[in-house]
Image: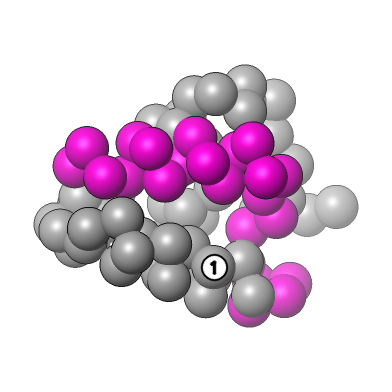
């Protein structure tokens, strides 16, 4: 697996998941400024996961933790 997909991050730590999975392609500032609501983040996260080799590989628990974190931004 590539660095985009591997991590020792706890599935419950949404901020760490963002920092290790999302910021490999996007700066944290861009993510923090997006201002999406829950539906917007679900759509965005699912679109990124769907990018195959370029998107993050997330378990259901990691996806949930990430979404819970993103809606707090």
Q: Kindly identify which residue carries mark 1.
A: 46
Please indicate whether residue 54 sits to the left or right of residue 25 in the image. right
What residue sits 47% from the left and 53% below the top?
Answer: 22
Instruction: Report if residue 55 lies within the magenta region.
Output: yes
Report the magenta stretch's main SS: helix
The span shown in magenta is 51-73
Q: Residue 30: x and y, percent? A: 22, 60
Q: Does residue 3 appear in this view? A: no
- Quadrant position of residue 8: top right
- Quadrant position of residue 36: bottom left
What residue sits 38% from the left and 37% below the top?
Answer: 68
What residue sits 39% from the left and 32% below the top?
Answer: 15
Answer above or below: position of 37 versus 8: below
Answer above or below: position of 49 versus 1: below
Return the residue found at the far right. 1
Answer above or below: position of 47 versus 37: below
Please indicate whether residue 52 sits to the left or right of residue 49 in the image. right
> Alpha-carbon neighbours of circle 1 within 10 Å: few (<14), some, or many (≥20)?
some
- Please tell me how many numbered marks the rendered image carries: 1
Please indicate whether residue 73 sits to the left or right of residue 41 in the image. left
Q: Residue 67: x and y, percent? A: 42, 46
Q: Secondary structure at mark 1?
A: helix
Q: Does residue 38 appear in this view? A: yes
Instruction: Report if residue 30 lies within the magenta region.
Output: no
Please indicate whether residue 67 sits to the left or right of residue 54 in the image. left
Q: Residue 49: x and y, percent? A: 61, 66
**Image colouring:** one colour
What residue sits 43% from the left and 71% below the top?
Answer: 43
The C terminus - image quarter: top left
């Amino acid at each position: 697996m590539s660095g985009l997909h591997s991590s020792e991050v706890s599935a419950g730590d949404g901020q760490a998941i963002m920092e290790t999975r999302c910021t490999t392609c996007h700066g944290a500032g861009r993510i923090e400024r997006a201002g999406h609501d829950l539906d917007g983040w679900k759509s965005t996260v699912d679109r990124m996961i769907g990018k195959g080799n370029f998107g993050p590989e997330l378990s259901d628990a990691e996806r949930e933790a990430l979404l819970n974190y993103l809606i707090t931004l």
